[in-house]
Image (tube, rainbow, N blue to C red):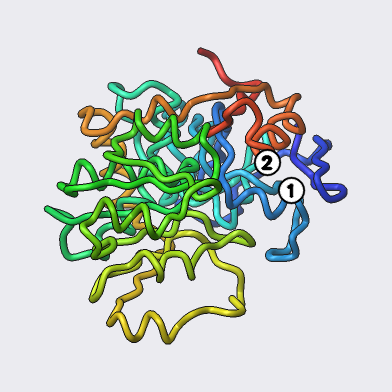
Amino acid sequence: MLAGQFTAPHRIDLVEAPEPMLTPGSSGEIIFQPELTCLCGSDTPYFTWSGEWPIRLGHSLHEMIGRVVATNGQRWKVGDRVLCVPPEQNGLWERYTVSEDRCVALDPRCSDAEAVLAQPLGTALFALKKLPTLVDLDVAIVGQGPMGQLFNMSVKALGARQVIGIDKLESRLKTSWKCGVTATICNASDDPLAKLKELTGGKGADIVIEAVGHAEQQFNLCIELLAYAGRILYFGVAPEIINGLRWRDLIFKNGTVHTSINPDFRRDFPLAMQWIAERRVDVNPLVTHTYKLAEIQTAFEAFRDRRDGAIKVFVEFPAYRR
C-alpha cells in the first residue's frame, strides 16, 4: 500500500509501506481506510519543512472520512464509515491503525465533503466555547482562510452583531460574503484599524479571533483591533516564540487572551456534524478543489499557493466510491 513521504522541502512522494496490523493482545483499535480528505493549514509546515515539527512517514493529513476495515474493539463494526482524526496528523496512508476513540459517526444527512469539514468546524466550536457569549458583540476574524471562514459562519450562528472578516487576499474576502460576514477589510490595501473603528463607532472589536497562525501570525494586529476589556481568541498555531509582541498594549487595554487546542471527540466533532446536518451552517463554499491521491503533490502546491482561489483542497483516496 502507499503512504506519504516528504522527501525535500515542498516535495511529497507516495512510497510503498507495509500493511497495518491490530496490536496483538490489545483492544479498542481499528484499521481505518481513508476515502476522502482535505488539507489544513497545519499540514503546510510539514510540506515546507518549516522545522516546527518532526517529519515522519505518513505526514501530513488529519481531516478525513473513510471505512473501518478491521477492529478488535466494541464501538465500530467492519464496514462502518466514520470521520477519523489520526494523532499527530499522521494520516497519509492508504490504511492505518488508530484508536477507535478517535472516530466519529457520519450523519447520513451530510455529503461526504461536508462530513470531512466537521473536523475543522469541531475545532472552531471547541475554541468558541472558551468565550462567555457572542450575542450582540462585534467580532473581527483575522485571516479568512478555511478556519477564518468557519469562524465567520459560527459566530454569526451564535448571535454576533457584526462579523468582520480581515485578510490580505481579496479572493478570500469574496468567499467571506458567502460565509456570514457583515463587512470585510483587505489589510493589503486599507488601514485595518481605521476601517474597524469606522465599523464599530471608534471602540474596536469586542472579540478578535486570530485564525492565521504559524510564521504569518497576526497577534499584534489583534491587539490593535481589540476594544477596551475585549477578548482575543488565539486559534492559529503560533510559532514557539513570538518576537516583538506588544504585550504591554494588551495589558493597558485590560484584554483577555484565550487559546485552544485538542477538541473533545465525544462532544465537539459530533456537535459540528450536527450543525452541518441541521443546516445551521453551510460549509459548501469552502470546497474549491479536488484531486486524486496520485496528484497529492499538485494538491499541496495548490493549497500552499492559494491557487485559483483555493480554500479547502480535497484529496480522493483509491478506496473512495462516490
Please tell me which residue lies in front, 70 or 236.
236
Going by the image, does 72 lie left or right of 123? right
Above or below: residue 252 compared with residue 262: below
Q: Residue 318 is drawn in which quadrant?
A: top right
Cα–Cα span, label 1 and label 2: 9 Å
- From where the camera sits, is residue 103 visible? no
Q: Residue at x 51, y 55 (%)?
A: 212
| Residue 186 x/y as whole percent | 47, 44
For disc 1, the marked residue is 47
The mark closer to the camera, 1 or 2, is: 2
Q: Is residue 191 left or right of residue 9?
A: left
Please tell me whether mark 2 sits on a helix, a strand or a loop. helix
Residue type highlighted by circle 1: Phe
**To which quarter of the image does residue 310 belong?**
top right
Mark linked to residue 173: none
Q: How many marks?
A: 2
Q: Position of residue 55 (x, y in %)?
A: 75, 58
Judging depth in this view, the residue of 287 and 177 nearest the camera is 177
The image shows residue 18, relative to residue 81, as above or below, that is: below
Labels 1 and 2: the sequence-earlier one: 1
The residue beneath circle 2 is 304
Residue at the (56%, 27%) spot, across then down: 35
Q: What is the residue that sits farthest to the top in this orientation?
A: 322
